[in-house]
Image: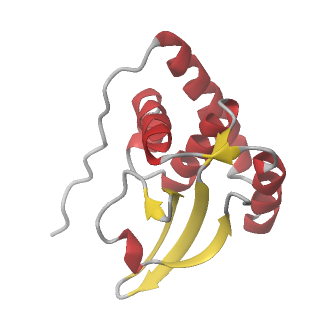
Amino acid sequence: MSMPIVPETAARPPLGRRLAARFAVGLAAVCVRLSPLRLAQVLRVLSRGARPADRRRALEARQAVVHVSVRCAGQGCLQRSVATVLLCRLTGTWPDWCTGARTQPFRAHAWVEAGGVPVGEPDDTPLYQVTLSVRHRT
């Protein structure tokens, strides 16, 4: 028997942040329809010129995305991660965007990192082998 999927919850962000998060979620919904390599190319272009996102800013962006989107609050990790980096980019920062897989059991996942640490993710995220990423350029 599997555990029921419980969506994440987050505190209600200010109105301006919610509007920006809705924009990022909508744009992410379009972006995730691209092939993985094309998506990474688009994100690389968008990441240019951004400052590295610190953990607090990345977590606030993730929480805003989760607050405005049921899909992102549930099992929509790809859209959630893309929306999070896009929302951070609107403020001039960029967290690392990562996708990966694990084999025991097989799972795929997408997430953001700040300072090399997954932001707002389950404790098992380090078990995923990164297969594609767009990291902040130093």
The answer to whether residue 116 is above or below residue 128 is above
Quarter of the image with the C terminus is bottom right
Q: Position of residue 46 (x, y in %)?
A: 79, 46
Q: Residue furthest top?
A: 15
Q: How is the image coloured?
A: secondary structure
Residue 32 place in picture, x, y as percent: 68, 52
Q: Residue at x 61, y 45 (%)?
A: 85
Q: Residue at x 59, y 41 (%)?
A: 83
- The single residue placed furthest to the left in the displayed view is 1
Q: Is residue 64 left or right of residue 5?
A: right
Determine the residue located farthest toward the bottom in the rendered image.
104
Query: Going by the picture, which residue comes out furthest to the front?
Result: 138
On the image, the x and y values in percent for residue 38 come to: 82, 61
Q: Which one is nearer the viewer's eye here, 132 or 76?
A: 132
- Judge left or right: residue 36 versus residue 96: right
Going by the image, does 86 lie left or right of 17?
right
In the depicted view, which residue is nearer to us: 84 or 57?
57
User: Would you place residue 24 above or below residue 55 in this image?
Assistant: above
What's the residue at 55%, 13% (across, down)?
Answer: 16
Q: Position of residue 77 (x, y in %)?
A: 48, 54
Q: Which residue does the image show at 60% across and 58% down from the upper left? A: 96
Q: Quadrant of residue 73?
A: top left
Q: Considering the image in quadrants, where does the N terminus appear?
A: bottom left
Give the tally of numbered discs: 0
